[in-house]
Amino acid sequence: MVRVDAFKGCSSERVGIGIVENEICKIIKKKNHFFLKYQGFGLSIETHKELVNQKVKKVLFIYLGQKVRYYVARLEDFKQKGIVYENKVEGGIIDLQYILPKSFMKEKQVGDKI
């Protein structure tokens, strides 16, 4: 298992956002992490590059909305189908992100094969 880090919202602090296990990155997303405008979830382009280097194939989002939902996306879809978003972080840093709409993800249930 390998820890995955990214910027915490708009702060310049980096925090653990998930883990990599068996070519799958598992990330917990809270309700405020869902981009309503794009109907999807973001992944920092820097983090995306790290995951490519770690040979990750899929991303599993564990979404803690009104009820827990599981969404799976292919890592390559973030770069190919995602929307580039400029997340402005403290200190003038721009944290570029890929926002992937849920329409490019598959919703899964507990016990489903990822």
Image: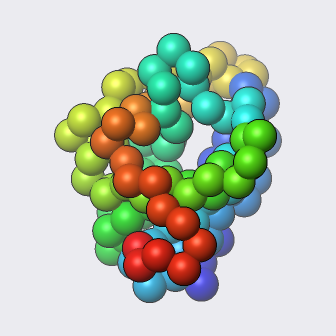
Image quadrant in which the N terminus is located: bottom right
Instruction: Check the image and report above or below for 56 versus 74.
Output: below
Name the foreground residue: 67 vs 95: 67
- How was this image coloured? rainbow
Q: Position of residue 60 (x, y in %)?
A: 50, 61
Quarter of the figure with residue 59: bottom left
Tally the marks: 0
Residue 60 in sight here? no
Identify which residue is drawn at 54% across, 80% down.
Answer: 111
Quarter of the figure with residue 88: top right
Identify which residue is drawn at 73% across, 41% down.
Answer: 65
Quarter of the figure with residue 102: top left
Image quadrant in which the C terminus is located: bottom left
Left or right position of 97 against 31? left
Q: Position of residue 85 (x, y in %)?
A: 45, 22
Identify which residue is drawn at 49% across, 43% down.
Answer: 43
Q: Position of residue 6 (x, y in %)?
A: 63, 48
Q: Position of residue 94 (x, y in %)?
A: 55, 23
Name the foreground residue: 70 vs 53: 70
Left or right position of 34 against 104? right
Residue 3 in sight here? yes
Instruction: Check the image and report above or below for 26 versus 33.
Output: below
Left or right position of 31 against 44? right
